[in-house]
Amino acid sequence: MGLNGLTLAVPRGALFGSTLDLLDRLGVDTAEVRANDRKLLFEDAGLVTMRPSDVPTYVEAGAADLGITGKDVLAEQSERAVYELVDLRFGPCVMIFATTAGDDRAAEALRRLGVMRVATKYPRIARRHFDRTGRQAEIVEVKGSVELAPLTGLVEGIVDLTATGTTLRENGLVVREEILASTARLIANPVAHKLRAAEIDDVVARVREALA
Amino acid sequence: MHAVTERVRRVFDAHGYGEIHTPALEYEQVLVRGDPAAADPAYKLFDEQGNVLVLRSDMTIPIARVVSARYAHAEMPLRFCYVAHAYRSVRPQRGQDREMLQAGVELVGAPAPEGTAEALEVLCTALDAVGLEGYRIGLGDASLYPALLDAHAVPEAARVKILHELGTRDFVGVEREVGGLRLGPEATATLTGVPQRRGGMEVLEGVGPAADRLRAVVERLSPAVAARVIFDLGLSRPLAYYTGAVFEVYDAALGAPLGGGRYDDLLGRFGRALPAVGWALNVERLHIALVGEHGRGETLLAAEAAAAAAQRLRAGSEAPAATGGDQAPWA
Protein backbone atom coordinates (compact mmCIF):
# COMPACT_ATOMS: atom_id res chain seq x y z
CA MET A 1 0.00 0.00 0.00
CA GLY A 2 1.12 3.57 0.40
CA LEU A 3 2.70 5.08 -2.68
CA ASN A 4 4.46 1.97 -4.06
CA GLY A 5 7.85 3.55 -3.43
CA LEU A 6 7.02 6.63 -5.48
CA THR A 7 7.82 10.14 -4.26
CA LEU A 8 4.91 12.59 -4.06
CA ALA A 9 5.25 16.38 -3.98
CA VAL A 10 2.64 17.63 -1.47
CA PRO A 11 1.46 21.26 -1.62
CA ARG A 12 1.49 23.22 1.62
CA GLY A 13 -1.15 25.92 1.94
CA ALA A 14 -4.82 25.73 0.98
CA LEU A 15 -4.59 22.22 -0.54
CA PHE A 16 -2.50 20.76 2.31
CA GLY A 17 -5.32 19.43 4.53
CA SER A 18 -7.34 17.79 1.74
CA THR A 19 -4.16 16.29 0.27
CA LEU A 20 -3.24 14.67 3.59
CA ASP A 21 -6.81 13.39 4.02
CA LEU A 22 -6.59 11.79 0.58
CA LEU A 23 -3.22 10.24 1.46
CA ASP A 24 -4.73 8.76 4.65
CA ARG A 25 -7.35 7.04 2.53
CA LEU A 26 -4.55 5.63 0.31
CA GLY A 27 -2.94 4.11 3.38
CA VAL A 28 -0.04 6.56 3.61
CA ASP A 29 1.02 7.38 7.16
CA THR A 30 0.70 11.17 7.39
CA ALA A 31 1.01 11.44 11.21
CA GLU A 32 4.60 12.65 11.00
CA VAL A 33 3.73 15.24 8.33
CA ARG A 34 0.82 16.56 10.39
CA ALA A 35 2.99 16.76 13.51
CA ASN A 36 5.87 18.58 11.83
CA ASP A 37 5.31 22.11 10.61
CA ARG A 38 8.89 22.86 9.63
CA LYS A 39 10.23 19.58 8.30
CA LEU A 40 9.96 19.40 4.49
CA LEU A 41 11.13 15.93 3.50
CA PHE A 42 9.51 12.73 4.78
CA GLU A 43 11.46 9.90 3.20
CA ASP A 44 9.69 7.01 4.92
CA ALA A 45 6.30 8.06 3.64
CA GLY A 46 7.73 9.16 0.26
CA LEU A 47 6.50 12.73 0.66
CA VAL A 48 8.11 16.11 0.01
CA THR A 49 6.22 19.24 1.02
CA MET A 50 6.52 22.57 -0.77
CA ARG A 51 4.60 25.58 -2.04
CA PRO A 52 1.97 24.59 -4.62
CA SER A 53 3.66 26.67 -7.33
CA ASP A 54 6.91 24.69 -6.87
CA VAL A 55 5.23 21.31 -7.38
CA PRO A 56 5.41 21.31 -11.23
CA THR A 57 9.10 22.29 -11.03
CA TYR A 58 10.02 19.31 -8.84
CA VAL A 59 7.86 16.89 -10.80
CA GLU A 60 9.12 18.03 -14.20
CA ALA A 61 12.73 17.58 -13.11
CA GLY A 62 11.99 14.14 -11.65
CA ALA A 63 12.83 15.19 -8.08
CA ALA A 64 9.36 13.83 -7.31
CA ASP A 65 7.56 11.17 -9.40
CA LEU A 66 4.08 12.46 -8.62
CA GLY A 67 2.70 15.74 -7.34
CA ILE A 68 -0.51 17.43 -6.30
CA THR A 69 -1.18 21.05 -7.20
CA GLY A 70 -3.93 23.36 -8.44
CA LYS A 71 -4.99 23.68 -12.06
CA ASP A 72 -4.31 27.43 -11.66
CA VAL A 73 -0.61 26.67 -11.06
CA LEU A 74 -0.50 24.27 -14.03
CA ALA A 75 -2.18 26.82 -16.30
CA GLU A 76 0.30 29.50 -15.26
CA GLN A 77 3.23 27.12 -15.85
CA SER A 78 1.76 25.50 -18.94
CA GLU A 79 5.21 24.86 -20.46
CA ARG A 80 6.10 22.31 -17.77
CA ALA A 81 6.41 18.82 -19.24
CA VAL A 82 4.26 16.90 -16.74
CA TYR A 83 1.30 14.54 -17.18
CA GLU A 84 -1.98 15.66 -15.66
CA LEU A 85 -3.57 12.42 -14.49
CA VAL A 86 -6.57 12.98 -12.21
CA ASP A 87 -8.90 15.81 -11.26
CA LEU A 88 -8.94 15.45 -7.46
CA ARG A 89 -11.95 17.78 -7.20
CA PHE A 90 -10.88 19.39 -3.91
CA GLY A 91 -9.63 22.98 -3.53
CA PRO A 92 -12.15 24.49 -5.96
CA CYS A 93 -11.54 28.13 -6.88
CA VAL A 94 -11.95 30.43 -9.85
CA MET A 95 -9.52 32.69 -11.68
CA ILE A 96 -11.37 35.98 -12.13
CA PHE A 97 -10.99 39.43 -13.57
CA ALA A 98 -12.27 42.02 -11.05
CA THR A 99 -12.44 45.78 -10.76
CA THR A 100 -13.70 48.18 -8.11
CA ALA A 101 -17.48 48.21 -7.67
CA GLY A 102 -19.53 50.80 -9.52
CA ASP A 103 -18.44 52.01 -12.94
CA ASP A 104 -16.06 49.59 -14.65
CA ARG A 105 -12.84 51.58 -14.55
CA ALA A 106 -11.01 49.04 -16.71
CA ALA A 107 -13.58 49.36 -19.51
CA GLU A 108 -13.36 53.11 -19.12
CA ALA A 109 -9.56 53.03 -19.46
CA LEU A 110 -9.83 50.82 -22.55
CA ARG A 111 -12.32 53.20 -24.13
CA ARG A 112 -10.37 56.38 -23.38
CA LEU A 113 -6.75 55.20 -23.53
CA GLY A 114 -6.93 51.94 -25.50
CA VAL A 115 -5.08 50.12 -22.72
CA MET A 116 -5.82 49.11 -19.15
CA ARG A 117 -3.52 48.21 -16.29
CA VAL A 118 -4.07 44.89 -14.54
CA ALA A 119 -2.32 43.60 -11.42
CA THR A 120 -1.87 39.85 -10.92
CA LYS A 121 0.26 37.06 -9.52
CA TYR A 122 -0.56 35.08 -12.67
CA PRO A 123 0.94 37.13 -15.52
CA ARG A 124 0.75 34.38 -18.14
CA ILE A 125 -2.88 33.46 -17.50
CA ALA A 126 -3.78 37.17 -17.54
CA ARG A 127 -1.81 37.81 -20.74
CA ARG A 128 -3.43 34.85 -22.50
CA HIS A 129 -6.92 35.91 -21.39
CA PHE A 130 -6.59 39.47 -22.69
CA ASP A 131 -4.86 38.34 -25.88
CA ARG A 132 -7.69 35.92 -26.55
CA THR A 133 -10.36 38.53 -25.91
CA GLY A 134 -8.55 41.15 -27.95
CA ARG A 135 -7.87 43.74 -25.29
CA GLN A 136 -4.64 45.54 -24.63
CA ALA A 137 -3.52 45.30 -21.04
CA GLU A 138 -0.41 46.31 -19.18
CA ILE A 139 0.25 43.44 -16.78
CA VAL A 140 1.64 44.53 -13.41
CA GLU A 141 3.06 41.58 -11.53
CA VAL A 142 2.73 41.80 -7.76
CA LYS A 143 3.71 39.29 -5.08
CA GLY A 144 1.51 40.28 -2.16
CA SER A 145 -2.17 41.17 -1.81
CA VAL A 146 -3.41 41.87 -5.30
CA GLU A 147 -6.63 43.49 -3.98
CA LEU A 148 -4.63 46.49 -2.83
CA ALA A 149 -3.51 47.49 -6.32
CA PRO A 150 -6.82 48.86 -7.74
CA LEU A 151 -7.68 50.57 -4.42
CA THR A 152 -4.53 52.71 -4.57
CA GLY A 153 -4.96 53.56 -8.24
CA LEU A 154 -1.97 51.48 -9.32
CA VAL A 155 -4.18 49.56 -11.77
CA GLU A 156 -7.78 49.48 -13.00
CA GLY A 157 -8.35 45.75 -12.56
CA ILE A 158 -6.93 42.54 -11.16
CA VAL A 159 -6.68 38.90 -12.24
CA ASP A 160 -6.67 36.70 -9.18
CA LEU A 161 -7.83 33.45 -7.67
CA THR A 162 -10.89 33.41 -5.43
CA ALA A 163 -12.61 30.59 -3.58
CA THR A 164 -15.49 32.35 -1.82
CA GLY A 165 -15.19 35.95 -3.00
CA THR A 166 -15.05 37.25 0.57
CA THR A 167 -11.73 39.09 0.26
CA LEU A 168 -12.91 40.71 -2.98
CA ARG A 169 -16.15 41.91 -1.39
CA GLU A 170 -14.43 43.24 1.70
CA ASN A 171 -12.18 45.34 -0.50
CA GLY A 172 -15.02 46.70 -2.60
CA LEU A 173 -14.17 44.68 -5.74
CA VAL A 174 -16.63 42.95 -8.07
CA VAL A 175 -16.03 40.05 -10.44
CA ARG A 176 -16.38 41.11 -14.08
CA GLU A 177 -15.25 37.88 -15.80
CA GLU A 178 -14.48 34.29 -14.88
CA ILE A 179 -11.36 33.05 -16.64
CA LEU A 180 -10.69 29.53 -15.38
CA ALA A 181 -12.18 27.11 -12.85
CA SER A 182 -9.53 25.30 -10.87
CA THR A 183 -9.31 22.21 -8.68
CA ALA A 184 -6.42 20.12 -7.40
CA ARG A 185 -4.77 17.77 -9.91
CA LEU A 186 -2.53 14.74 -9.62
CA ILE A 187 0.46 15.14 -11.93
CA ALA A 188 3.33 12.83 -12.93
CA ASN A 189 6.87 13.13 -14.24
CA PRO A 190 6.93 12.02 -17.93
CA VAL A 191 9.79 9.56 -17.50
CA ALA A 192 8.42 8.04 -14.27
CA HIS A 193 5.05 7.76 -16.05
CA LYS A 194 6.67 5.31 -18.50
CA LEU A 195 9.30 3.57 -16.40
CA ARG A 196 7.10 3.05 -13.34
CA ALA A 197 3.81 2.65 -15.17
CA ALA A 198 2.42 -0.16 -13.01
CA GLU A 199 3.11 1.64 -9.72
CA ILE A 200 1.63 4.90 -10.98
CA ASP A 201 -1.45 3.25 -12.50
CA ASP A 202 -2.07 1.50 -9.18
CA VAL A 203 -1.88 4.80 -7.26
CA VAL A 204 -4.19 6.44 -9.83
CA ALA A 205 -6.72 3.59 -9.51
CA ARG A 206 -6.74 3.88 -5.72
CA VAL A 207 -7.03 7.67 -5.88
CA ARG A 208 -10.06 7.32 -8.15
CA GLU A 209 -11.54 4.79 -5.75
CA ALA A 210 -10.98 7.12 -2.80
CA LEU A 211 -12.68 9.95 -4.69
CA ALA A 212 -15.68 7.92 -5.81
CA MET B 1 31.28 14.28 -24.40
CA HIS B 2 33.97 13.42 -26.90
CA ALA B 3 33.93 9.80 -25.77
CA VAL B 4 30.16 9.74 -26.26
CA THR B 5 30.18 11.11 -29.81
CA GLU B 6 33.17 8.94 -30.69
CA ARG B 7 31.39 5.77 -29.64
CA VAL B 8 28.15 6.75 -31.31
CA ARG B 9 30.03 7.45 -34.55
CA ARG B 10 31.65 4.02 -34.45
CA VAL B 11 28.21 2.42 -34.20
CA PHE B 12 26.98 4.51 -37.14
CA ASP B 13 30.01 3.36 -39.15
CA ALA B 14 29.50 -0.26 -38.25
CA HIS B 15 25.91 -0.14 -39.48
CA GLY B 16 26.85 1.50 -42.76
CA TYR B 17 25.54 5.00 -42.05
CA GLY B 18 27.40 7.81 -43.81
CA GLU B 19 27.90 11.11 -42.03
CA ILE B 20 26.17 14.06 -43.65
CA HIS B 21 26.91 17.76 -43.15
CA THR B 22 24.37 20.40 -44.03
CA PRO B 23 24.58 24.15 -43.44
CA ALA B 24 23.30 25.44 -40.12
CA LEU B 25 21.39 28.09 -42.08
CA GLU B 26 18.42 27.06 -44.22
CA TYR B 27 15.93 29.03 -46.28
CA GLU B 28 12.78 29.53 -44.26
CA GLN B 29 10.59 28.48 -47.18
CA VAL B 30 12.29 25.08 -47.25
CA LEU B 31 11.44 24.40 -43.61
CA VAL B 32 7.84 25.57 -44.13
CA ARG B 33 7.50 23.04 -46.90
CA GLY B 34 8.60 20.27 -44.57
CA ASP B 35 6.25 21.27 -41.78
CA PRO B 36 4.73 24.64 -40.92
CA ALA B 37 5.19 23.97 -37.21
CA ALA B 38 8.85 23.05 -37.63
CA ALA B 39 9.32 26.35 -39.37
CA ASP B 40 8.84 28.22 -36.17
CA PRO B 41 12.54 28.42 -35.53
CA ALA B 42 13.92 30.72 -32.91
CA TYR B 43 16.52 32.51 -34.98
CA LYS B 44 15.83 34.19 -38.29
CA LEU B 45 17.93 36.54 -40.37
CA PHE B 46 17.97 38.08 -43.84
CA ASP B 47 20.61 37.65 -46.51
CA GLU B 48 21.68 40.44 -48.87
CA GLN B 49 18.81 39.60 -51.29
CA GLY B 50 16.18 39.80 -48.58
CA ASN B 51 15.67 36.02 -48.32
CA VAL B 52 14.69 34.82 -44.87
CA LEU B 53 17.26 32.42 -43.42
CA VAL B 54 16.76 30.38 -40.27
CA LEU B 55 19.00 28.36 -38.00
CA ARG B 56 17.92 24.73 -38.31
CA SER B 57 15.87 23.39 -35.39
CA ASP B 58 16.62 19.77 -36.27
CA MET B 59 18.39 17.76 -38.97
CA THR B 60 15.41 15.89 -40.36
CA ILE B 61 14.13 18.49 -42.80
CA PRO B 62 17.62 19.52 -44.03
CA ILE B 63 18.34 15.85 -44.81
CA ALA B 64 14.99 15.49 -46.58
CA ARG B 65 15.95 18.48 -48.69
CA VAL B 66 19.35 16.99 -49.56
CA VAL B 67 17.82 13.64 -50.47
CA SER B 68 15.30 15.12 -52.87
CA ALA B 69 17.87 17.46 -54.42
CA ARG B 70 20.87 15.18 -54.74
CA TYR B 71 19.70 11.60 -54.39
CA ALA B 72 16.59 11.82 -56.56
CA HIS B 73 17.55 8.72 -58.55
CA ALA B 74 19.77 6.94 -56.06
CA GLU B 75 19.17 3.36 -55.09
CA MET B 76 17.29 2.86 -51.82
CA PRO B 77 17.60 2.63 -48.91
CA LEU B 78 19.90 5.51 -48.03
CA ARG B 79 21.57 5.61 -44.63
CA PHE B 80 22.61 8.98 -43.21
CA CYS B 81 23.97 9.88 -39.81
CA TYR B 82 25.01 13.13 -38.21
CA VAL B 83 26.53 14.63 -35.10
CA ALA B 84 25.46 18.22 -35.46
CA HIS B 85 24.16 21.25 -33.66
CA ALA B 86 20.54 22.34 -33.82
CA TYR B 87 19.04 25.51 -32.42
CA ARG B 88 15.91 26.24 -30.47
CA SER B 89 14.34 28.98 -28.42
CA VAL B 90 14.73 28.84 -24.67
CA ARG B 91 12.86 30.11 -21.68
CA PRO B 92 15.15 32.28 -19.62
CA GLN B 93 16.56 30.92 -16.37
CA ARG B 94 15.64 27.33 -17.15
CA GLY B 95 19.16 26.11 -17.81
CA GLN B 96 18.32 25.35 -21.43
CA ASP B 97 20.86 25.68 -24.21
CA ARG B 98 20.04 27.55 -27.38
CA GLU B 99 22.48 25.29 -29.21
CA MET B 100 22.21 21.56 -28.66
CA LEU B 101 24.35 18.76 -30.00
CA GLN B 102 22.34 16.02 -31.65
CA ALA B 103 23.52 12.60 -32.77
CA GLY B 104 21.12 10.78 -35.01
CA VAL B 105 20.32 8.82 -38.15
CA GLU B 106 17.90 8.99 -41.03
CA LEU B 107 17.08 5.80 -42.91
CA VAL B 108 15.43 6.76 -46.17
CA GLY B 109 13.41 4.50 -48.41
CA ALA B 110 13.08 1.46 -46.14
CA PRO B 111 9.54 0.10 -45.73
CA ALA B 112 7.79 0.45 -42.39
CA PRO B 113 8.30 -2.44 -40.00
CA GLU B 114 11.78 -3.32 -41.25
CA GLY B 115 12.95 0.29 -41.38
CA THR B 116 11.65 1.10 -37.92
CA ALA B 117 13.19 -2.07 -36.52
CA GLU B 118 16.59 -1.26 -38.04
CA ALA B 119 16.48 2.27 -36.61
CA LEU B 120 15.67 0.90 -33.15
CA GLU B 121 18.49 -1.65 -33.39
CA VAL B 122 20.99 1.08 -34.26
CA LEU B 123 19.60 3.28 -31.48
CA CYS B 124 20.04 0.59 -28.83
CA THR B 125 23.49 -0.37 -30.10
CA ALA B 126 24.52 3.28 -29.84
CA LEU B 127 23.14 3.62 -26.29
CA ASP B 128 24.83 0.37 -25.25
CA ALA B 129 28.08 1.58 -26.79
CA VAL B 130 28.14 4.77 -24.74
CA GLY B 131 27.48 2.71 -21.64
CA LEU B 132 23.94 3.63 -20.71
CA GLU B 133 22.36 0.75 -18.83
CA GLY B 134 18.93 1.57 -17.46
CA TYR B 135 17.37 3.07 -20.56
CA ARG B 136 14.03 2.10 -22.10
CA ILE B 137 12.41 2.90 -25.42
CA GLY B 138 8.81 4.13 -25.39
CA LEU B 139 7.21 3.06 -28.69
CA GLY B 140 3.91 4.37 -29.98
CA ASP B 141 2.16 5.13 -33.24
CA ALA B 142 1.28 8.68 -34.21
CA SER B 143 -1.76 7.62 -36.25
CA LEU B 144 -3.16 5.24 -33.63
CA TYR B 145 -5.19 7.69 -31.60
CA PRO B 146 -6.41 9.80 -34.56
CA ALA B 147 -7.60 6.55 -36.21
CA LEU B 148 -9.45 5.66 -33.03
CA LEU B 149 -11.14 9.06 -33.04
CA ASP B 150 -12.16 8.48 -36.68
CA ALA B 151 -13.52 5.05 -35.82
CA HIS B 152 -15.82 6.69 -33.26
CA ALA B 153 -16.84 9.40 -35.75
CA VAL B 154 -15.64 12.22 -33.50
CA PRO B 155 -16.44 15.57 -35.15
CA GLU B 156 -13.52 17.68 -36.36
CA ALA B 157 -13.85 20.46 -33.76
CA ALA B 158 -13.81 18.03 -30.84
CA ARG B 159 -11.03 16.03 -32.45
CA VAL B 160 -8.75 19.06 -32.58
CA LYS B 161 -9.45 19.80 -28.91
CA ILE B 162 -8.87 16.22 -27.79
CA LEU B 163 -5.58 15.96 -29.70
CA HIS B 164 -4.53 19.29 -28.19
CA GLU B 165 -5.19 18.01 -24.65
CA LEU B 166 -3.27 14.83 -25.47
CA GLY B 167 -0.38 16.84 -26.92
CA THR B 168 -0.16 18.90 -23.73
CA ARG B 169 -0.21 15.68 -21.63
CA ASP B 170 -3.48 16.64 -19.98
CA PHE B 171 -5.49 13.44 -19.42
CA VAL B 172 -7.98 15.35 -17.29
CA GLY B 173 -8.64 17.53 -20.34
CA VAL B 174 -8.95 14.44 -22.59
CA GLU B 175 -11.53 13.02 -20.18
CA ARG B 176 -13.46 16.29 -20.13
CA GLU B 177 -13.53 16.63 -23.93
CA VAL B 178 -14.35 12.97 -24.55
CA GLY B 179 -17.01 13.08 -21.82
CA GLY B 180 -18.58 16.06 -23.57
CA LEU B 181 -19.20 13.92 -26.68
CA ARG B 182 -21.72 11.64 -24.85
CA LEU B 183 -20.58 8.53 -26.70
CA GLY B 184 -21.77 5.87 -24.30
CA PRO B 185 -19.69 4.20 -21.57
CA GLU B 186 -17.70 1.77 -23.71
CA ALA B 187 -16.52 4.28 -26.30
CA THR B 188 -15.75 6.82 -23.60
CA ALA B 189 -13.68 4.30 -21.70
CA THR B 190 -11.75 3.42 -24.88
CA LEU B 191 -11.03 6.99 -25.89
CA THR B 192 -9.92 8.06 -22.41
CA GLY B 193 -8.18 4.81 -21.50
CA VAL B 194 -6.17 3.96 -24.61
CA PRO B 195 -3.81 6.98 -24.56
CA GLN B 196 -2.95 6.16 -20.94
CA ARG B 197 -1.98 2.59 -21.78
CA ARG B 198 1.70 1.77 -21.62
CA GLY B 199 3.50 -1.49 -20.94
CA GLY B 200 4.01 -4.82 -22.69
CA MET B 201 2.17 -6.58 -25.53
CA GLU B 202 -1.04 -6.69 -23.48
CA VAL B 203 -1.71 -2.95 -24.02
CA LEU B 204 -2.11 -3.59 -27.77
CA GLU B 205 -5.38 -5.50 -27.36
CA GLY B 206 -8.36 -4.07 -29.21
CA VAL B 207 -6.93 -0.89 -30.65
CA GLY B 208 -7.12 -1.66 -34.36
CA PRO B 209 -4.62 -1.90 -37.20
CA ALA B 210 -2.07 0.48 -35.67
CA ALA B 211 -1.43 -2.17 -33.00
CA ASP B 212 -0.57 -4.70 -35.71
CA ARG B 213 1.99 -2.25 -37.09
CA LEU B 214 3.60 -1.96 -33.65
CA ARG B 215 3.59 -5.75 -33.23
CA ALA B 216 5.22 -6.12 -36.64
CA VAL B 217 8.04 -3.81 -35.56
CA VAL B 218 8.73 -5.60 -32.31
CA GLU B 219 8.66 -9.04 -33.98
CA ARG B 220 11.61 -7.89 -36.09
CA LEU B 221 13.73 -6.75 -33.15
CA SER B 222 16.48 -8.77 -31.53
CA PRO B 223 15.49 -9.97 -28.04
CA ALA B 224 17.87 -7.55 -26.28
CA VAL B 225 16.29 -4.58 -28.04
CA ALA B 226 12.72 -5.86 -27.73
CA ALA B 227 13.25 -6.15 -23.98
CA ARG B 228 13.92 -2.40 -23.88
CA VAL B 229 10.64 -1.49 -25.53
CA ILE B 230 7.64 -0.15 -23.63
CA PHE B 231 4.53 0.32 -25.74
CA ASP B 232 3.10 3.77 -25.13
CA LEU B 233 -0.22 4.36 -26.86
CA GLY B 234 -0.44 7.98 -25.73
CA LEU B 235 2.93 8.91 -27.16
CA SER B 236 2.55 11.89 -29.41
CA ARG B 237 5.20 14.10 -30.89
CA PRO B 238 4.58 17.75 -31.60
CA LEU B 239 5.48 17.87 -35.29
CA ALA B 240 2.77 17.20 -37.85
CA TYR B 241 4.94 15.14 -40.22
CA TYR B 242 4.98 12.14 -37.89
CA THR B 243 2.66 9.56 -39.41
CA GLY B 244 3.72 6.13 -38.17
CA ALA B 245 5.82 4.77 -35.35
CA VAL B 246 7.12 7.28 -32.81
CA PHE B 247 9.59 6.54 -30.07
CA GLU B 248 11.27 8.22 -27.14
CA VAL B 249 14.28 7.25 -25.04
CA TYR B 250 13.98 7.36 -21.25
CA ASP B 251 16.50 6.81 -18.53
CA ALA B 252 15.68 6.64 -14.85
CA ALA B 253 18.74 8.82 -14.12
CA LEU B 254 17.18 11.79 -15.93
CA GLY B 255 13.70 13.24 -15.58
CA ALA B 256 13.43 14.19 -19.26
CA PRO B 257 13.56 12.11 -22.45
CA LEU B 258 17.00 11.73 -24.05
CA GLY B 259 15.73 11.85 -27.59
CA GLY B 260 13.21 10.42 -29.95
CA GLY B 261 12.37 9.33 -33.44
CA ARG B 262 9.60 8.60 -35.89
CA TYR B 263 8.56 6.95 -39.11
CA ASP B 264 6.98 9.26 -41.65
CA ASP B 265 6.39 10.35 -45.22
CA LEU B 266 8.07 13.73 -44.93
CA LEU B 267 10.04 13.32 -48.14
CA GLY B 268 6.88 13.30 -50.21
CA ARG B 269 6.66 17.01 -49.54
CA PHE B 270 10.03 17.50 -51.23
CA GLY B 271 9.13 15.77 -54.47
CA ARG B 272 9.96 12.13 -54.07
CA ALA B 273 7.48 10.02 -52.11
CA LEU B 274 9.76 8.00 -49.85
CA PRO B 275 9.22 6.73 -46.35
CA ALA B 276 11.87 7.66 -43.83
CA VAL B 277 12.66 6.77 -40.26
CA GLY B 278 15.07 8.60 -38.02
CA TRP B 279 15.97 9.53 -34.50
CA ALA B 280 18.10 12.04 -32.69
CA LEU B 281 19.74 11.82 -29.29
CA ASN B 282 20.49 14.93 -27.30
CA VAL B 283 24.19 14.34 -26.57
CA GLU B 284 24.32 16.69 -23.58
CA ARG B 285 21.37 14.97 -21.91
CA LEU B 286 22.87 11.59 -22.72
CA HIS B 287 26.05 12.69 -20.97
CA ILE B 288 24.09 13.87 -17.91
CA ALA B 289 22.24 10.54 -17.75
CA LEU B 290 25.56 8.66 -17.99
CA VAL B 291 27.03 10.67 -15.15
CA GLY B 292 23.83 10.09 -13.19
CA GLU B 293 24.06 6.33 -13.72
CA HIS B 294 27.74 5.78 -13.08
CA GLY B 295 29.30 8.75 -11.38
CA ARG B 296 32.05 10.57 -13.20
CA GLY B 297 35.21 8.45 -13.13
CA GLU B 298 33.66 5.12 -13.91
CA THR B 299 31.73 6.14 -16.99
CA LEU B 300 34.19 5.02 -19.63
CA LEU B 301 35.17 1.74 -18.02
CA ALA B 302 31.53 0.90 -17.57
CA ALA B 303 30.94 1.82 -21.19
CA GLU B 304 33.59 -0.62 -22.36
CA ALA B 305 32.13 -3.40 -20.25
CA ALA B 306 28.56 -2.70 -21.29
CA ALA B 307 29.42 -2.53 -24.98
CA ALA B 308 31.27 -5.82 -24.75
CA ALA B 309 28.39 -7.41 -22.87
CA ALA B 310 25.86 -6.12 -25.36
CA GLN B 311 27.97 -7.44 -28.20
CA ARG B 312 28.09 -10.87 -26.60
CA LEU B 313 24.33 -10.76 -26.11
CA ARG B 314 23.74 -9.88 -29.75
CA ALA B 315 26.21 -12.47 -30.99
CA GLY B 316 24.33 -15.05 -28.96
CA SER B 317 20.97 -14.05 -30.36
CA GLU B 318 19.91 -13.35 -33.89
CA ALA B 319 22.18 -10.98 -35.79
CA PRO B 320 20.79 -7.46 -36.35
CA ALA B 321 18.84 -7.08 -39.56
CA ALA B 322 21.13 -4.77 -41.48
CA THR B 323 24.62 -4.29 -40.15
CA GLY B 324 26.33 -2.54 -42.99
CA GLY B 325 29.87 -3.65 -42.17
CA ASP B 326 31.82 -6.16 -40.18
CA GLN B 327 34.40 -3.74 -38.82
CA ALA B 328 32.72 -3.31 -35.44
CA PRO B 329 35.62 -1.82 -33.47
CA TRP B 330 34.86 -3.50 -30.19
CA ALA B 331 34.27 -6.93 -31.64
Image: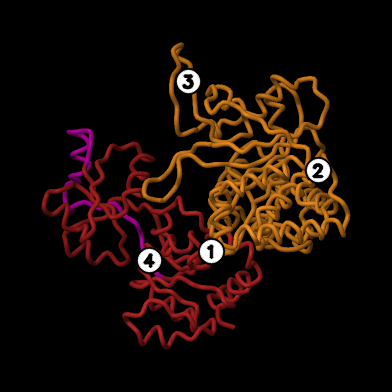
Does the magenta segment cover residue A66?
no
On what subunit does the disc labeled 4 rest? A
Residue under pointer 2: B327
Q: Amino acid at mark 3?
A: Val
**Disc 2 and disc 1 on one polypeptide chain:** no
Q: CA distance from mark 4 to mark 1?
A: 14 Å
Between circles 3 and 2, the one closer to the viewer is 2
Q: Nearer the viewer, mark 4 or mark 2?
A: 2
In the displayed structure image, the side of residue A212 where residue A159 appears, left or right: left
Q: Secondary structure at mark 4?
A: helix
Q: Quadrant of residue A31?
A: bottom left
Q: Which residues are magenta?
A: A91-116
Q: Which residue corresponds to mark 4?
A: A52
Q: Is residue B168 left or right of residue B301?
A: left
Q: In the rendered image, which quarter contains the C terminus of chain A?
A: bottom right
Pick whichever of labels 3 and 2 is earlier in the sequence.
3
- What is the CA distance from the residue labelled 3 to the residue labelled 1? 40 Å
Q: CA distance from mark 4 to mark 2?
A: 55 Å
* B311 or B104: nearer the viewer: B311
* Residue type for callout 2: Gln
A123 w.r.t. A13: above or below: above
